[in-house]
Amino acid sequence: MARVRIKQVRSLINHPKKQRQTIAALGLGKINKTVEHELNPAIEGMIRKVAHLIEVEHLS
């Protein structure tokens, strides 16, 4: 399965609690923190919900 590298690039200040929880579920929480995940439907949904706060790089 494909992997993705997710990097938080924006602050969570003044964003809804659901978005803060989604960022935490992805393993992020500080600006410039990077994590890698297997791409599956659950992760894709989380990425869509907080796309304005993160950068996504698709890995092989």
Image (cartoon, rainbow, N blue to C red):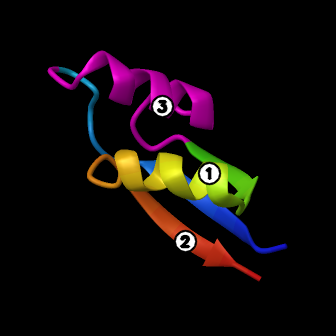
Whether residues under marks 3 and 1 lie with C-beta atoms below 8 angstroms apart, the answer is no
Q: Which residue is mark 1?
A: 43
- Label drawn at residue 57: 2
Whether residues under marks 2 and 3 lie with C-beta atoms below 8 angstroms apart, the answer is no
Residue under the point 71% across and 60% down: 40
Above or below 46: residue 59: below
Q: Mark 3: few, some, or many residues within 10 Å (few <14, many ≥20)?
A: some
Magenta segment includes 27: yes
Which sits earlier in the primary sequence, circle 2 or circle 3? 3
Distance from Cα at disc 3 to Cα at disc 1: 10 Å
- 21 with respect to 25 (left or right): left
> What stretch of residues is rendered in magenta?
14-33
At label 2, the amino acid type is Glu
Distance from Cα at disc 2 to Cα at disc 3: 18 Å
Q: Which residue is mark 3?
A: 22
| Residue 8 visible in the picture | yes
Whether residues under marks 2 and 1 lie with C-beta atoms below 8 angstroms apart, the answer is no
Distance from Cα at disc 2 to Cα at disc 1: 13 Å
Magenta segment includes 19: yes
Occupied quadrant, residue 19? top left
Residue 43 rendering spot, x and y as whole percentages: 62, 51
Q: Mark 1: few, some, or many residues within 10 Å (few <14, many ≥20)?
A: some
Q: Nearer the viewer, residue 8 or 43?
A: 43
Circle 1 sits in a helix, a strand or a loop, which is it?
Answer: helix
Residue 44 rendering spot, x and y as whole percentages: 56, 58
